[in-house]
Amino acid sequence: RQAASRQLTRHVMPMFHSEGIYLAGGDDNNNNANGEDDDAAGGKPAAAAVDAAAQQQVQEVGGDGVSTIMDTLPTNNTTTTTPTTSIHQTKRSIVISGVTSGLGRALLGYFYNHGHIVAGCGRNADEILVLQGHFPNAKLSVVDVADDASVQLWAESICSGGSGNDNDENTTQEQRNEERGQVDLVIANAGISPETLYPTKSTAWEVPRQDFDETIDVNVKGVANMIRHFVPRMVKNNNGTFVAMSSGLGRSPNPYQVAYCASKWAVEGMVKSLAMSLPLDGEMCAVPLAPGVVQTGGGGGSVDGKNNNNDGSSSSSSSGNIDKWIEVAGPMILGLSGKDNGKSLSVKGFYSVRYRQTWSFQDGSGIPDRVGHGYHV
């Protein structure tokens, strides 16, 4: 099943990249590509919104089409909460899943080129080999995040460092952390959406069991496996940030993305619950992050993001392209801290206001105080 999925993914011509997966399709009927049930925000009845969605030839997982993105992209006056000149002064030890394409590859290139220690994984062995040539000091591995045993071995290989230099006065804290294999930022980015590859839209009862199962295996169990094998190490050090790529479809439904919606709603609940389990006396945080709709290649883009440069950049100049996204997302992720724990966040400028109004909970929505906190020593 996994081999079949890999073959399917490699032969898709990507148009847009959204939330770590590729989308295929074209606007053959000259319909617009407004995003997931965007008409619902305009006050139409639910049935009318579904009918409008049924007329669209392009369904974009996790956000809006180019026409609406252009209205909300950051301008030159937009700044991140943490200045990029200072945020890279402290070297971070970062783990990223799904680095062989799209957003994962952009994150790998961005953090690596800013001097951080980066470990990444992907299922495509050929792409991992190519990336290792471009990023020789990165720790890149072939790992299927849906395989718990593989993730466990991967985590152990990254976190088992140790040189006995903890008491060396000439060794900095950053060097000691690197030598001990301590990880302080984990990004669960890997994700799939077979539904976007169907030649016609499929309702809930039409999604094949195999596709539904694999979506849950990668998008939900894959995140759970990352939590299981990386977070306890961060808790032990009472330091670290866990980010899981969610989606607008983790906050708003779509009749033709049932499996993907189910997986991303699960991610939201899982990561918020994780946040409640983290120690209160440190700067740890867990955040579900909706990345937005990001164009990684034009209509003629080649498969698996190979039109992207391997340094994490892209030649595309269209609104919503990967270059603009990473310059916002990279510093934002590095700037997350304890004050963000449990908040549902999104990368600013890559969803329209109209679409975000359809979300069941808005940006910055945290854990209600009445829920309490579940951490126990």
Image (cartoon, helix red, strand yellow):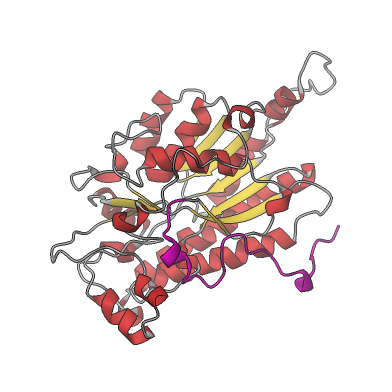
What residue do we see at 33% from left, 63% from top? 194
Quarter of image, res 109: top left
Seen in the image, is 3 located left or right of residue 136? Answer: left
Q: Residue 217, relative to residue 314: is it above or below?
A: below
Seen in the image, is 248 located left or right of residue 286? Answer: left
**Magenta residues, start to end:** 349-377
Determine if residue 54 is in view.
yes
Coordinates of residue 204 in the picture (x, y in percent): 36, 79
Quarter of image, res 377: bottom right
| Nearest the eye: 320 or 244 | 320
Q: Main secondary structure of the magenta part?
A: loop
Q: Residue 347, relative to residue 93: is it above or below?
A: below
Q: Is residue 351 magenta?
A: yes
Q: Is residue 9 magenta?
A: no
Seen in the image, is 11 located left or right of residue 353? Answer: left
Seen in the image, is 370 located left or right of residue 43? Answer: right
What residue do we see at 27% from left, 43% from top? 297
What residue do we see at 22% from left, 74% from top? 55
Coordinates of residue 185 in the picture (x, y in percent): 63, 42
Quarter of image, res 364: bottom right
Image quarter (top left, top right, bottom left or bottom right) of the N terminus: bottom left
